[in-house]
Image (cartoon, rainbow, N blue to C red):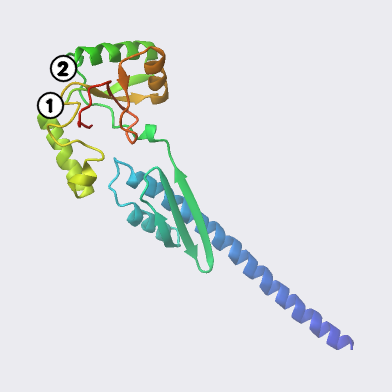
Amino acid sequence: MTVLVAGIAIIVTLLLGGLTVTIEHIFVDRERAQAAADAGALAAAAEASPYGTGSAEEVARSFAEANGAALVSCSCQDPSSIVVTTSIGSVTARSHAVFDAALMAPARGAAYDPGRLDPRVAAAVERLLDAARGRVHVVSGYRSPARQARLWAAALRKYGSPEAADDWVAPPGHSMHERGLAVDLGGDLALARRLVQTMGLPLHRPLPNEPWHFELIGARGGAGD
Protein backbone atom coordinates (compact mmCIF):
# COMPACT_ATOMS: atom_id res chain seq x y z
CA MET A 1 0.00 0.00 0.00
CA THR A 2 2.83 2.36 0.87
CA VAL A 3 4.48 1.71 -2.47
CA LEU A 4 1.19 2.35 -4.28
CA VAL A 5 0.62 5.65 -2.47
CA ALA A 6 4.17 6.73 -3.19
CA GLY A 7 3.70 5.87 -6.86
CA ILE A 8 0.49 7.86 -7.04
CA ALA A 9 2.20 10.79 -5.31
CA ILE A 10 4.99 10.71 -7.88
CA ILE A 11 2.50 10.65 -10.77
CA VAL A 12 0.51 13.53 -9.27
CA THR A 13 3.71 15.50 -8.77
CA LEU A 14 4.73 14.93 -12.35
CA LEU A 15 1.29 15.94 -13.59
CA LEU A 16 1.31 19.09 -11.49
CA GLY A 17 4.79 19.87 -12.71
CA GLY A 18 3.64 19.51 -16.29
CA LEU A 19 0.61 21.66 -15.55
CA THR A 20 2.83 24.36 -14.07
CA VAL A 21 5.02 24.39 -17.16
CA THR A 22 1.95 24.59 -19.40
CA ILE A 23 0.49 27.49 -17.43
CA GLU A 24 3.82 29.31 -17.58
CA HIS A 25 3.93 28.86 -21.34
CA ILE A 26 0.40 30.20 -21.64
CA PHE A 27 1.29 33.29 -19.62
CA VAL A 28 4.41 33.87 -21.70
CA ASP A 29 2.48 33.43 -24.96
CA ARG A 30 -0.22 35.78 -23.71
CA GLU A 31 2.32 38.48 -22.91
CA ARG A 32 4.03 38.04 -26.27
CA ALA A 33 0.73 38.10 -28.14
CA GLN A 34 -0.33 41.26 -26.29
CA ALA A 35 2.98 42.96 -27.03
CA ALA A 36 2.59 42.06 -30.69
CA ALA A 37 -0.97 43.39 -30.75
CA ASP A 38 0.07 46.65 -29.07
CA ALA A 39 2.96 47.19 -31.47
CA GLY A 40 0.84 46.33 -34.49
CA ALA A 41 -1.99 48.66 -33.45
CA LEU A 42 0.30 51.62 -32.87
CA ALA A 43 2.13 51.09 -36.15
CA ALA A 44 -1.14 50.63 -38.06
CA ALA A 45 -2.58 53.81 -36.57
CA ALA A 46 0.41 55.78 -37.81
CA GLU A 47 0.18 54.26 -41.27
CA ALA A 48 -3.59 54.82 -41.52
CA SER A 49 -3.28 58.53 -40.79
CA PRO A 50 -3.35 61.04 -43.67
CA TYR A 51 0.41 61.36 -43.39
CA GLY A 52 1.22 57.65 -43.34
CA THR A 53 1.65 55.36 -46.33
CA GLY A 54 -1.85 53.91 -46.07
CA SER A 55 -0.61 50.31 -45.69
CA ALA A 56 -1.96 49.86 -42.16
CA GLU A 57 -2.76 46.13 -42.34
CA GLU A 58 0.57 45.21 -43.90
CA VAL A 59 2.44 47.15 -41.23
CA ALA A 60 0.35 45.56 -38.46
CA ARG A 61 1.19 42.11 -39.83
CA SER A 62 4.88 42.96 -40.04
CA PHE A 63 5.02 44.15 -36.43
CA ALA A 64 3.04 41.14 -35.21
CA GLU A 65 5.38 38.72 -36.94
CA ALA A 66 8.43 40.61 -35.67
CA ASN A 67 7.13 39.90 -32.16
CA GLY A 68 6.62 36.20 -32.89
CA ALA A 69 2.84 36.37 -33.41
CA ALA A 70 0.44 36.02 -36.31
CA LEU A 71 -1.99 38.76 -37.33
CA VAL A 72 -5.55 37.50 -36.91
CA SER A 73 -7.32 40.69 -37.97
CA CYS A 74 -6.83 44.43 -38.36
CA SER A 75 -9.78 46.81 -38.28
CA CYS A 76 -7.98 49.58 -40.13
CA GLN A 77 -10.78 51.41 -41.97
CA ASP A 78 -11.16 54.21 -39.43
CA PRO A 79 -7.77 55.91 -38.99
CA SER A 80 -8.85 57.35 -35.63
CA SER A 81 -9.59 53.92 -34.12
CA ILE A 82 -7.49 50.87 -35.00
CA VAL A 83 -8.14 47.40 -33.54
CA VAL A 84 -5.52 44.68 -34.05
CA THR A 85 -5.87 41.03 -32.98
CA THR A 86 -2.87 38.69 -32.88
CA SER A 87 -2.28 35.08 -31.84
CA ILE A 88 0.46 32.78 -30.65
CA GLY A 89 -0.65 29.18 -30.66
CA SER A 90 -4.05 29.03 -28.98
CA VAL A 91 -3.61 32.40 -27.25
CA THR A 92 -5.07 35.56 -28.80
CA ALA A 93 -4.72 39.21 -27.81
CA ARG A 94 -6.35 42.42 -28.97
CA SER A 95 -5.18 46.03 -28.86
CA HIS A 96 -7.13 49.20 -29.58
CA ALA A 97 -5.13 52.26 -30.69
CA VAL A 98 -6.87 55.63 -30.34
CA PHE A 99 -5.15 58.92 -31.06
CA ASP A 100 -6.01 62.61 -31.11
CA ALA A 101 -6.53 63.83 -34.65
CA ALA A 102 -5.16 67.19 -33.61
CA LEU A 103 -1.74 65.56 -33.39
CA MET A 104 -1.91 64.69 -37.10
CA ALA A 105 -1.46 68.26 -38.27
CA PRO A 106 0.86 68.75 -41.25
CA ALA A 107 4.54 69.24 -40.59
CA ARG A 108 5.55 72.82 -39.91
CA GLY A 109 7.56 74.71 -42.47
CA ALA A 110 5.13 75.70 -45.24
CA ALA A 111 5.48 79.36 -46.15
CA TYR A 112 2.99 81.69 -44.53
CA ASP A 113 2.46 85.05 -46.14
CA PRO A 114 -0.51 86.90 -44.56
CA GLY A 115 -0.41 89.33 -47.46
CA ARG A 116 -1.67 86.60 -49.81
CA LEU A 117 -4.70 85.83 -47.61
CA ASP A 118 -8.10 87.45 -47.78
CA PRO A 119 -7.82 90.50 -45.46
CA ARG A 120 -10.61 89.16 -43.23
CA VAL A 121 -8.79 85.85 -42.77
CA ALA A 122 -5.44 87.53 -42.23
CA ALA A 123 -6.84 89.87 -39.58
CA ALA A 124 -8.60 87.05 -37.75
CA VAL A 125 -5.52 84.83 -37.79
CA GLU A 126 -3.27 87.62 -36.51
CA ARG A 127 -5.64 88.27 -33.59
CA LEU A 128 -5.76 84.55 -32.83
CA LEU A 129 -1.96 84.21 -32.88
CA ASP A 130 -1.51 87.23 -30.61
CA ALA A 131 -4.02 85.85 -28.10
CA ALA A 132 -2.45 82.37 -28.19
CA ARG A 133 0.95 83.76 -27.09
CA GLY A 134 3.00 81.30 -29.10
CA ARG A 135 0.87 78.22 -28.42
CA VAL A 136 -0.63 78.30 -31.94
CA HIS A 137 1.18 78.80 -35.23
CA VAL A 138 0.34 78.80 -38.94
CA VAL A 139 1.40 75.71 -40.85
CA SER A 140 -0.03 76.60 -44.24
CA GLY A 141 -1.84 79.66 -45.56
CA TYR A 142 -2.12 80.70 -49.18
CA ARG A 143 -1.17 78.05 -51.74
CA SER A 144 -0.31 78.66 -55.35
CA PRO A 145 -2.03 76.54 -58.02
CA ALA A 146 1.31 74.80 -58.62
CA ARG A 147 1.63 73.91 -54.93
CA GLN A 148 -1.95 72.59 -54.82
CA ALA A 149 -1.29 70.53 -57.95
CA ARG A 150 1.73 68.89 -56.29
CA LEU A 151 -0.30 68.08 -53.19
CA TRP A 152 -3.09 66.62 -55.33
CA ALA A 153 -0.66 64.47 -57.32
CA ALA A 154 0.86 63.12 -54.10
CA ALA A 155 -2.61 62.34 -52.72
CA LEU A 156 -3.54 60.46 -55.90
CA ARG A 157 -0.41 58.32 -55.61
CA LYS A 158 -1.09 57.62 -51.96
CA TYR A 159 -4.85 56.94 -52.00
CA GLY A 160 -5.19 55.50 -55.50
CA SER A 161 -8.31 57.30 -56.72
CA PRO A 162 -9.66 60.86 -57.01
CA GLU A 163 -12.57 59.95 -54.73
CA ALA A 164 -10.30 58.80 -51.91
CA ALA A 165 -7.75 61.58 -52.41
CA ASP A 166 -10.48 64.24 -52.29
CA ASP A 167 -11.17 63.31 -48.66
CA TRP A 168 -7.84 64.91 -47.76
CA VAL A 169 -6.73 67.22 -50.56
CA ALA A 170 -8.81 69.32 -52.94
CA PRO A 171 -8.05 69.16 -56.67
CA PRO A 172 -6.22 72.17 -58.12
CA GLY A 173 -8.60 75.06 -58.58
CA HIS A 174 -10.93 73.87 -55.81
CA SER A 175 -8.94 74.61 -52.65
CA MET A 176 -9.85 77.37 -50.23
CA HIS A 177 -6.11 77.84 -49.71
CA GLU A 178 -5.71 78.89 -53.35
CA ARG A 179 -8.29 81.61 -52.77
CA GLY A 180 -6.62 82.81 -49.59
CA LEU A 181 -9.66 81.85 -47.55
CA ALA A 182 -8.16 79.10 -45.36
CA VAL A 183 -5.24 78.36 -43.10
CA ASP A 184 -3.91 75.20 -41.46
CA LEU A 185 -2.89 75.78 -37.86
CA GLY A 186 -0.52 73.83 -35.64
CA GLY A 187 0.16 73.71 -31.93
CA ASP A 188 -2.69 73.78 -29.41
CA LEU A 189 -5.70 73.32 -31.69
CA ALA A 190 -8.13 73.09 -28.78
CA LEU A 191 -6.97 76.53 -27.68
CA ALA A 192 -7.31 77.83 -31.24
CA ARG A 193 -10.91 76.61 -31.38
CA ARG A 194 -11.73 78.22 -28.03
CA LEU A 195 -10.18 81.54 -29.06
CA VAL A 196 -12.16 81.56 -32.29
CA GLN A 197 -15.35 81.14 -30.29
CA THR A 198 -14.62 83.47 -27.39
CA MET A 199 -13.19 86.23 -29.58
CA GLY A 200 -15.94 85.94 -32.19
CA LEU A 201 -13.49 85.48 -35.03
CA PRO A 202 -15.06 84.85 -38.48
CA LEU A 203 -13.41 81.42 -38.79
CA HIS A 204 -14.72 77.87 -38.53
CA ARG A 205 -13.62 74.27 -39.07
CA PRO A 206 -15.81 72.77 -41.81
CA LEU A 207 -13.79 69.55 -42.26
CA PRO A 208 -14.33 67.12 -39.35
CA ASN A 209 -11.34 64.97 -40.36
CA GLU A 210 -8.99 67.99 -40.43
CA PRO A 211 -9.17 69.81 -37.09
CA TRP A 212 -6.25 72.01 -38.13
CA HIS A 213 -8.12 73.50 -41.12
CA PHE A 214 -9.77 76.89 -40.44
CA GLU A 215 -11.46 79.01 -43.06
CA LEU A 216 -13.61 82.10 -43.44
CA ILE A 217 -17.24 81.60 -42.43
CA GLY A 218 -19.58 81.67 -45.40
CA ALA A 219 -16.82 81.32 -47.97
CA ARG A 220 -17.31 77.64 -48.77
CA GLY A 221 -18.94 76.80 -52.04
CA GLY A 222 -17.81 73.31 -52.89
CA ALA A 223 -14.17 74.02 -52.19
CA GLY A 224 -12.01 71.91 -49.96
CA ASP A 225 -8.63 71.76 -48.32
Tell me which numbered mark, 1 or 2, is placed earlier along the sequence. 2
**Residue at mark 1:** 144
Q: Is residue 21 left or right of residue 79?
A: right
Residue 186 appears at what percent x and percent y? Answer: 33, 25
Q: Is residue 55 left or right of residue 115?
A: right
- Mark 1 neighbour class, 10 Å CA radius: few under 14, some 14 to 19, many 20 or more: some
Secondary structure type for disc 2 = helix
* Depth order, front residue of 166/219: 219
Residue 5's image quarter?
bottom right
Q: Residue at x 64, y 69 (%)?
A: 21
Whether residue 81 is visible: yes
* Depth order, front residue of 202/190: 202
Q: Is residue 106 above or below residue 84?
A: above
Residue 194's image quarter?
top left
**Residue at mark 2:** 116
Q: What amino acid is at disc 2?
A: Arg
Q: Residue at x 84, y 87 (%)?
A: 4
